Each structure stands twice: as C-alpha cells, then as structure tokens.
Amino acid sequence: MRSCCFGFNSKQERALFRELIKVNGVGPKLALAILSGMSAQQFVTAVEKEEIASLVKLPGVGQKDG
C-alpha cells in the first residue's frame, strides 16, 4: 500500500475529499479531479440542485457504459 499526502485550500475542501472517497467507485484520484474542476461549495450546490450537466463536465464523472 502506498502512502500519499494531499494538501487542501480549506477545511471544507478536505472534508468533501474525505466524503468523496467513501463513495463506491471514487478513489483519491477522482476525488482530486472533482475538486480541481470546481470548488467544494460549487460541487455541493450542484449535487443538492441535481445539476447533472455541471457534474458530468467533471473529469471521470458520468454514466458508465455497460
């Protein structure tokens, strides 16, 4: 197992990262990509308002084919 360190701009960003990596199929790489694509507050708002169009623009986010 590799150990990595991550830095965050705010406690909210770190808390969201920790919640994201608890989601099945979301690892640290995808969680960081999500946080790179929009702020933690923007992500939370997009999820709350079910703004699918905004969310699927994030790298690695979208429907799986199959």
Image (cartoon, rainbow, N blue to C red):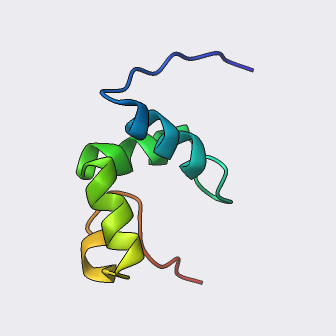
Q: Position of residue 45 (x, y in %)?
A: 32, 67
Q: Is residue 56 shown to the viewer in this render?
A: no
The answer to whether residue 6 is left or right of residue 53 is: right
Q: Is residue 62 above or below residue 37?
A: below
Image quadrant in which you'd find residue 2:
top right
Task: Give me the residue at 64% from left, 57% from top.
Answer: 23
- Quarter of the rendering occupied by the C terminus: bottom right
- Quarter of the rendering occupied by the N terminus: top right
Relative depth, front residue between 12 and 28: 12
Q: Position of residue 57 (x, y in %)?
A: 25, 68
Q: Is residue 4 above or below residue 24?
A: above
Task: Give me the residue at 37% from left, 26% from top.
Answer: 8
Residue positioned most to the right: 1
Q: Is residue 60 shown to the viewer in this render?
A: yes
The answer to whether residue 63 is left or right of residue 13 is: right
Q: Position of residue 65 (x, y in %)?
A: 52, 81
Image quadrant in which you'd find residue 28:
top right
Image quadrant in which you'd find residue 56:
bottom left
Task: Give me the residue at 30% from left, 80% from top.
Answer: 51
Q: Is residue 11 above or below residue 32?
A: above
Residue positioned most to the front: 11
Numbered circles on residues, count: 0
The answer to whether residue 1 is left or right of residue 56 is: right
Relative depth, front residue between 57 and 15: 15
Q: Is residue 56 above or below residue 66?
A: above
